[in-house]
Image: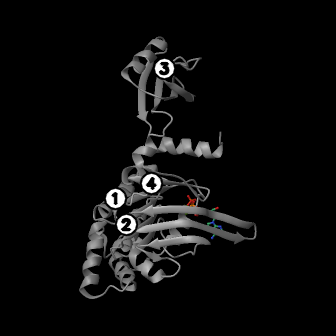
Amino acid sequence: MASGTGQSAPVLQVAGVSRSFRSRQGTVQALKGVDLTVGPGELVGLLGLNGAGKSTLLKIISTLLLPTGGTVRVCGHDVARRPREVQRRLSLVLGGERGLYLRLSARDNLRFFATLTGLKGPDLARRCEQAVEFVGLGPAADRPVETYSKGMRQRLHLAIGMVTRPELLLLDEPTVGLDPAEAENIRTAVSAMRDQGTTILLTSHYLNDIEQLAERVVVLHDGRVLHDLPLPRLLERAKTAAVVTLTGRGTAPPQPPVALDGLASVGTLQQHASSWSLELHVRAWTPESLRHLADLWPDQQLTDVRVAPSGLQQVFMELADDVKSPA
Ligand SMILES: Nc1ncnc2c1ncn2[C@@H]1O[C@H](COP(=O)(O)OP(=O)(O)OP(=O)(O)O)[C@@H](O)[C@H]1O
Ligand SMILES: [Mg+2]
């Protein structure tokens, strides 16, 4: 297993962690023996389908939930035995709009939450100002939070999460429901925190977030770690190199170009009023492939060929297919 810890003492050590929930419908085993070690300064992306156990794991690490079995240590402190020590060293930031005082300004929210953690005096004032600037809320920081957009509220959550300068920052879907520009603001702030040396564990269903930020990816499935790999190694697992979208005039070709070199599978074919488009998944894509394609269909009047190299999205879809329908 990749631990990524090098020589330094790990910030996070999760060993054999399980967690079950009892409900009227029976017992749900949300985590089934998770091992994960994260070293100082690492930014690890935590991926998994809905219900994989990501949030449960983050809640256990942040002392909101106790594990049913196994141990979790944050900077060497056990979450079950030394929750205060753990809480002092980490922040959990959740996506969504919960937990802010809407009538108060961003500055007052920050001061309130920072005071709860024991900050006071000039330290409190300075850290709050830095956090406000860091997430780019400066000009709006005295307005009541009820006048804020979703993205600004999320940036405030992030500012609250960082005001204590935690050693470990846990981010559970920090960009959920944000427009692309606000999601980028959040990514910029997260990457700046990483650059300052904060160790970060990030979950997101927007693979863009993980692809841009994480150097290592842990894939959880059904309460277990399915993969724990550096991002480039995970990307190499793509069964196809690219998705090629062909567009042509008139009627769609009766036969998909099965003779194309390197073709892995034929994706969706769409017929529009006066044009068509067809997706091809290819194992390799070279200038030769383009010539070959033009030879195969000289009469189909291809008007466009778009090549999208496989990214995390593609790898994740393949992994999801594999676990849904194991070979
Ligand atoms: N408080 C709870 N009571 C009962 N079952 C729970 C509780 N919390 C989580 N679960 C169950 O545990 C499993 C893991 O849930 P969890 O929220 O950790 O998944 P997740 O990976 O965060 O999913 P998502 O991507 O949807 O956020 C799911 O089956 C969920 O229904
Ligand atoms: Mg979740």
Q: How many marks?
A: 4
Q: Do the residues labelled 1 and 2 touch (CB within 8 Å)?
A: yes
Q: Position of residue 296 (x, y in %)?
A: 48, 13
Q: Position of residue 50 (x, y in %)?
A: 59, 56
Q: Are marks 3 and 4 in contact (CB under 8 Å)?
A: no
Q: Which residue is drawn at 26% across and 73% down?
A: 130
Residue for badge 1: 185
Q: Which residue is drawn at 45% across and 83% down?
A: 84
Q: Is residue 43 visible?
A: yes
- 262 relative to 51, above or below: above
Q: Nearer the viewer, mark 3 or mark 2?
A: 3
Q: What residue type is labelled 4?
A: Ala
Give me the disc on residue 155: 2
Q: Nearer the viewer, mark 4 or mark 2?
A: 4
Disc on the earlier residue, 1 or 2: 2
Mark 1, secondary structure of its residue: helix
Residue for badge 4: 2
Residue for badge 3: 261
Q: Nearer the viewer, mark 3 or mark 4?
A: 4
What whole-number distance in Å separates the C-alpha atoms at marks 3 and 4? 36 Å
Q: Residue at x 60, y 42 (%)?
A: 321
Mark 3, secondary structure of its residue: loop
Disc on the earlier residue, 4 or 2: 4
What whole-number distance in Å separates the C-alpha atoms at marks 3 and 2? 48 Å
Q: Is residue 272 visible?
A: no
Crowding at label 3, few (<14), some or many (≥20) Cα neighbours within 10 Å?
some
Q: What residue type is labelled 3?
A: Asp
